[in-house]
Amino acid sequence: MEARIQVRRAAERFLGGDAEAGISTRHAFSFSGFYDPDNVRFGPLSACNEELLAPGAGFAEHPHRDVEIVTWVVEGELVHEDSAGHVEAVRPGDVQWLSAGEGVRHVERNGGAGPLRFVQMWLTPLEAGGPPVYGVSRSVPDGEVCALPRAGAVLHVRRPGAGERCALPGAQWLYVHVVRGALRLAGWTLAEGDSARVQDAMSLDAVALDEGAELLLWEMRAEARFP
């Protein structure tokens, strides 16, 4: 079966956030006040937000339930606090995940003196409910960095050198997000902020076009279910 690839450019993202509060957001999917019936989700992935927060800016305490939230910090320091008692500072190269389960409240803010840039991704779990679960992995190496059994999904990171070819995981749904740099994927050139949605991915690889490339890859094998 041949893989089906849809490329979405950084410039196509919906612009959101709150400029007066120092928050700029670029949404890859329908989110908040923006709704596109043809762009609601890809497999269980329902959000991939690029966030830029000014020093001191943040999101006040708010609730979540029945969603898996994974955060990748690109620049700066993200401070997370939640109703389960977790308080953590998350920095570049760290990955944070929050399985909201039957319900949790949290706060996210820029805890540093400079700008904070991060990518936050939401996935729908296979089943509703369960206790909230939180975790952080520090300075993660290339490879599998975060498994979400509740959503039937695994996050990988790749940092190929210029001209280096790297294999992509095979999956029913594969989502590729370019955090930094540029790459070549099956005849497509992807730059920073671009993404590729691949269905029935088998034996695909990508070639980095410059130094400093960084890719986030979602390997997803389960149908999204709605609570």
Image (cartoon, rainbow, N blue to C red):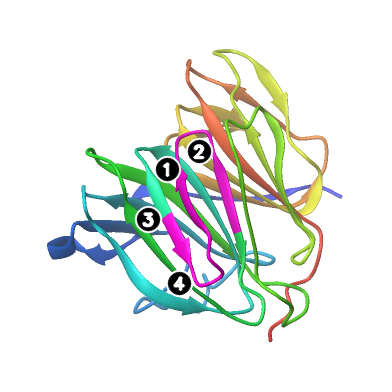
Q: CA distance from mark 3 to mark 4?
A: 12 Å
Give the CA separation, mark 2 to mark 4.
Answer: 19 Å
**Rendered residue at 82%/42% (across/down):** 202
Q: Quadrant of the C terminus?
A: bottom right
Tell me the crowding category of disc 2: few under 14, some 14 to 19, or many 20 or more residues within 10 angstroms, Cα based: many
Q: Which residue is mark 3?
A: 12
Give yes or no for residue 64 being in the magenta stretch. no
Return the mark for residue 154. Answer: none
Callouts 3 and 4 close, C-beta under 8 Å:
no
Disc 2 to disc 3: CB gap under 8 Å? no
Magenta residues (range): 80-97
- Judged from the image, the secondary structure of the residue bearing numbered disc 3 is helix
Foreground: disc 1 or disc 3: 1
What is the distance, in whole Å, between disc 2 and disc 3 at their CAs?
A: 14 Å
Question: Which disc number belongs to residue 30?
Answer: 4
Q: What residue did someone put label 1 on?
A: 193
Q: Residue at x 65, y 71 (%)?
A: 132
Q: What amino acid is labelled 3 in the image? A: Glu
Q: Residue at x 47, y 37 (%)?
A: 179
Q: Nearer the viewer, mark 2 or mark 3?
A: 2
Q: Are marks 1 and 2 in contact (CB under 8 Å)?
A: yes
Q: What element does badge 2 sit on?
A: strand
Label located before the other in sequence (3 or 4):
3
Q: Is residue 9 visible?
A: no
According to the picture, the residue beneath numbered tag 2 turns out to be 178
